[in-house]
Amino acid sequence: MDILVGASWQWANVEYVALIDRARTVRAASLPELAQLLYSMGIDEHDIRLAFSDDGDHAMSLKEHAEFGAAWLIAKGSDKG
């Protein structure tokens, strides 16, 4: 499975998207929401690639990369109950 997580800018607003196997798109208003959605779908973290500048318009900053990583850990931790 190949999942690319990136940003999608619409005017001054940003939403976050995950392109799954180049065929399906999941959208969320925030990185924590997107991480939770992907985790609940059973996505393996090793299949996730975070968009860098060479990914064009969907590139995310290093801060956004760190925010997604932290959100992923929280999503995993919430499963332990």
Image (cartoon, rainbow, N blue to C red):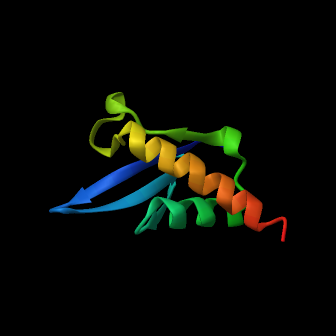
Tell me what residue is drawn at x 34 percent, y 40 percent: 59
3 displayed left or right of 10: right
Q: Is residue 54 visible?
A: yes
Q: Position of residue 44 (x, y in %)?
A: 72, 48
Q: Nearer the viewer, residue 78 or 19?
A: 78
Tell me what residue is drawn at x 40 percent, y 58 percent: 16
Eyeballing the image, is 54 above or below 16? above
Q: How many marks?
A: 0
Q: Nearer the viewer, residue 73 or 20?
A: 73
Q: Position of residue 4 (x, y in %)?
A: 50, 44
Q: Residue pushed farthest right?
A: 80
Q: Quadrant of residue 42?
A: bottom right
Tell me what residue is drawn at x 40 percent, y 69 percent: 29
25 displayed left or right of 9: right
Considering the image in quadrants, where does the N terminus appear? top right
Eyeballing the image, is 5 above or below 46? below
Q: Nearer the viewer, residue 61 or 54?
A: 61
Q: Residue pushed farthest top?
A: 54
Tell me what residue is drawn at x 84 percent, y 71 percent: 81
Q: Quadrant of residue 38?
A: bottom right
Q: Is residue 20 visible?
A: no
Q: Position of residue 2 (x, y in %)?
A: 60, 41
